[in-house]
Amino acid sequence: RRIAQEQALPTSINRSSRDICFAQEGYRALFAGSSVPPGDIVDVEGRKIGEHNGIFNYTIGQKKGLGTARQMSGGGEPLYVLRIEPKENRIVVAPLNLLYKKEIQVEKINYVGFEPPDKPLLVQTRIRYRQPDESATLIPVSEDGAIVIFDRPVFAPTAGQFAVFFCGRLLLGGGVIKG
């Protein structure tokens, strides 16, 4: 951003992160006025514990806005979105501890400036924009696929989002988290 400001580039004043870039009002505005059906909120056992007002309103790891889910869990520990099941039009919620994963699969990896590794690499991995890098082992399983085993479990890795790999400040590459 500093370099962009020094060069008087218009991007220097843009926010770093936005919802869908082509929907300046956010992605929910894209669905305004559409007939997105409500559906069930279920626990990990598949028991209905509430209703949602359209799956597009929820993200993996979300705690706020689940409405009756916490109340129906006995008012005990908070529940978080574990999984979104579009075909079933349902949201699966779970206690916080079930959202942590020690291992993920990554596909469509693009390695920057070098050939895909043929042996495990110790890397720093980031799976969310504002989450800190996490120490992990990248184990190649194909030319563009790998298993990532974290030193400690990470919060809510989400299918379809990116995992990015670093060695110090050097970007090694990144790919799509597989579901």
Image (spheres, rainbow, N blue to C red):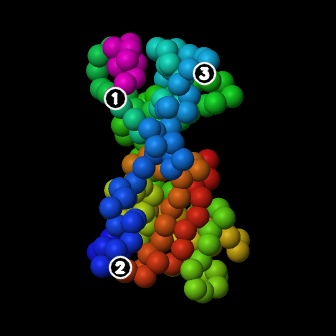
Q: Distance between the residues labelled 2 and 3?
A: 43 Å
Q: Which of marks 1 and 3 is in front?
A: 3
Q: Which of marks 1 and 2 is in front?
A: 2
How many other residues sit within 10 Å of disc 3, few (<14), some (14-19) or many (≥20)?
few
Q: Position of residue 2 (x, y in %)?
A: 29, 75
In this picture, residue 12 sits left or right of residue 37: left
Which element carries disc 1, helix, strand or loop? loop
Q: What stretch is highlighted in magenta?
A: 64-73
Answer with mark 1 or mark 2, whichever residue precedes in sequence.
Answer: 2
Examine the rendering and report whether any part of residue 46 can be seen.
no
Which element carries disc 3, helix, strand or loop? loop
In this picture, residue 78 sits left or right of residue 59: left
Up/down of 163 relative to 123, above or below: above
Q: Which residue is tagged 2?
A: 7
Q: Which residue is tagged 1?
A: 64
User: What residue is drawn where x is 45% and y is 58%?
Assistant: 127
